[in-house]
């Protein structure tokens, strides 16, 4: 069995797997068939391999256009010639030659530029942009004389007059407001100017505002800022305003902290402690974070939150949260773990007290890391270059509600670097590297391990007295014991003779 495993890892599934000559020949044949080189035996597109050209040929066949050429570059040349011919002749899409066939071949950037030229909304994914451009093409061909004239009803007249009266009342009320109210209204910002709403850089997300995501179950919008849940709101704009208020409050607090730290730089305060890797002493938090937090600019998406409005524990912002018997939240998706994650702290001071952080597997440690919010191992991140997406939970939708990229572009740092290599390779190769990361990057930085012998002087426990007592069994007890003993010996001997001891180990 070990010989087969080494052969399998060498040529198939190992981290440094190499292909044999036979595998290289078959791979070359498949590559030639997919690129359209040589005589392909596939008579129809259903028998052909799922390459880009074959998939494009199937889509064009469904649209009623037959693609005769073979190979990627030949197909591209044919499509360019077809587009030139369609642009010269008048089509149903209008004078500009807008057709669904042409728009499907364009990239998203080209579609956005085309939407900006036409004055159409350029937010959303590629299919939405194509639909908007086609609607614009159809509506643009109709003349103004053919557009139906809207009939103004009596109800519409009453509504417009009521709106005009309400605006006049609001204007008169604003004029009567004194100078004191104006000063109070100008307090949140600088000189009456407030911070603008925080917008995302990417336009493919569910919301264009930072920290705002929709809740499909209730139809509301939830807001979060720097990992702190702000609540759920009826409209997207209200949630964006809540994020802006939180950003302004954090900015004002940051300025106050800088002034206080400059004034009392020499004074010693309470600091969080972590275990030292070299010696058994302690270090201050400032010493461990000399390089700064590389994930400070990331947008943290907390996901759907539990409705804990009736819980008195979750309405208070605690100075410090300590979980006793913390291994009770080893299941990261159960209700106990989710309720523990939702506990709010003022400065993020959290402790986990447990005697068995690991019981069955390495993955049980993730719930404790998630509660302590140890970066980067407690979150999911996006593989897209330049994307600063950070999710506290795995999303179930096809697209990420935080950054808008595909769900499978996201990864868990704990699974990728620690648990998966250990499960797959054990204490060899990548598994050994995973154990080293678990020890050096996680446990040595956030775990304090104390035994009874180390704290003997502080605890002052009484000494252990071991007393050995030899008792004799009665006649009934000896008969019962001997019968069970003989029965287990017979079972074990049968397993040994048949070679199935390991199968019946439990």
Image (cartoon, rainbow, N blue to C red):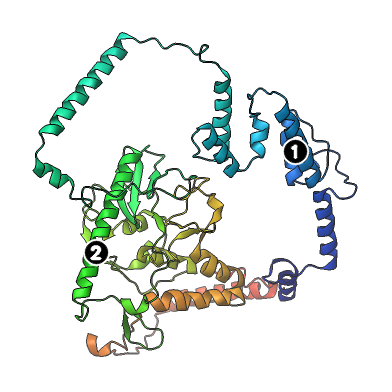
As drawn, 296 above or below 277: above
**369 and 113: which one is in front?**
113
Which residue is depicted at the point 58% across and 74% down?
431
**On the rendered structure, is 29 left or right of 450?**
right
Image coordinates for residue 402, horizontal then vertical, percent: 44, 50
As drawn, 385 above or below 103: below
Quadrant of res 268: bottom left
Q: Which mark is residue 80?
A: 1
**On the rendered structure, is 91 left or right of 251?**
right
Image coordinates for residue 159, horizontal then vertical, percent: 27, 17
Which residue is depicted at the point 56% across and 31% down?
133
Work out whether residue 479 can be spotted: no
**287 and 475: which one is in front?**
287
Work out whether residue 261 can be spotted: yes
Q: Which mark is residue 16?
A: none
Q: Which mark is residue 255?
A: 2
The local crowd at label 1, few if under 14, some if 14 to 19, many if 20 or more residues have their Cα within 10 Å, is few
Q: Secondary structure at mark 1?
A: helix
Q: How many marks?
A: 2
Quadrant, the N terminus: bottom right
- N-term-proximal mark, 1 vs 2: 1
Image coordinates for residue 207, horizontal then vertical, percent: 42, 43
**342 and 130: which one is in front?**
130
Which residue is depicted at the point 36% across and 55% down?
338
Q: Secondary structure at mark 2?
A: helix
């Amino acid at each position: 069995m070990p010989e087969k495993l080494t052969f399998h890892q060498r040529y198939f599934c190992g981290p440094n797997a190499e292909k044999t000559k036979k595998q290289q020949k078959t791979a070359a044949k498949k590559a030639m068939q997919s690129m359209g080189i040589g005589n392909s035996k596939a008579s129809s597109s259903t028998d052909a391999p799922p390459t880009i050209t074959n998939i494009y040929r199937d889509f064009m066949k469904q649209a009623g256009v037959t693609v005769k050429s073979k190979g990627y570059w030949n197909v591209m040349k044919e499509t360019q010639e077809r587009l030139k011919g369609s642009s010269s002749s008048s089509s149903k899409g209008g004078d500009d030659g807008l057709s669904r066939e042409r728009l499907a071949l364009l990239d998203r950037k080209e579609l956005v530029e085309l939407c900006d030229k036409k004055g159409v909304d350029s937010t959303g994914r590629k299919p939405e942009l194509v639909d908007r451009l086609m609607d614009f093409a159809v509506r643009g061909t109709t003349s103004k004389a053919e557009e139906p004239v809207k009939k103004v009803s009596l109800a519409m007249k009453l509504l417009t007059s009521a709106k005009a009266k309400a605006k006049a009342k609001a204007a008169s009320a604003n004029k009567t407001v004194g100078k004191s109210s104006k000063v109070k209204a100008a307090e949140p910002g600088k000189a009456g100017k407030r911070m603008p709403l925080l917008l995302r850089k990417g336009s493919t997300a569910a919301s264009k505002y930072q920290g705002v995501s929709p809740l499909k179950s209730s139809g509301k919008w939830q807001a979060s800022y720097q990992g702190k849940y702000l609540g759920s709101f009826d409209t997207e704009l209200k949630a964006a305003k809540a994020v802006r208020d939180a950003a302004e409050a954090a900015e004002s607090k940051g300025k106050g902290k800088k002034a206080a730290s400059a004034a009392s730089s020499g004074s010693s305060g309470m600091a969080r402690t972590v275990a030292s890797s070299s010696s058994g002493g302690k270090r201050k938090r400032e010493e461990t974070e000399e390089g700064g937090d590389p994930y400070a600019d990331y947008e943290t998406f907390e996901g759907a939150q539990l409705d804990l409005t009736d819980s008195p524990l979750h309405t208070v912002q605690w100075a410090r949260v300590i979980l006793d018997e913390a291994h009770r939240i080893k299941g990261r998706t159960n209700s106990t773990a989710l309720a523990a994650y939702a506990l709010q702290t003022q400065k993020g001071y959290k402790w986990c007290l447990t005697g068995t952080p690991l019981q069955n597997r390495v993955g049980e440690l993730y719930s404790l890391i998630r509660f302590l919010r140890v970066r980067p191992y407690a979150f999911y991140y996006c593989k897209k270059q330049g994307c600063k997406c950070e999710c506290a939970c795995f999303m179930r939708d096809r697209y990420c509600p935080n950054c808008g990229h595909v769900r499978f572009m996201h990864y868990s740092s704990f699974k990728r670097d620690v648990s998966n290599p250990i499960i797959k390779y054990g204490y060899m190769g990548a598994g050994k590297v995973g154990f080293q990361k678990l020890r050096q990057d996680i446990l040595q930085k956030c775990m304090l391990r104390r035994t009874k012998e180390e704290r003997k002087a502080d605890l002052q426990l009484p000494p252990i007295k071991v007393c050995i007592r030899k008792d004799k069994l009665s006649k009934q007890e000896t008969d019962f014991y001997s019968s069970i003993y003989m029965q287990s010996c017979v079972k074990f001997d049968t397993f040994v003779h048949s070679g199935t001891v390991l199968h019946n180990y439990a």
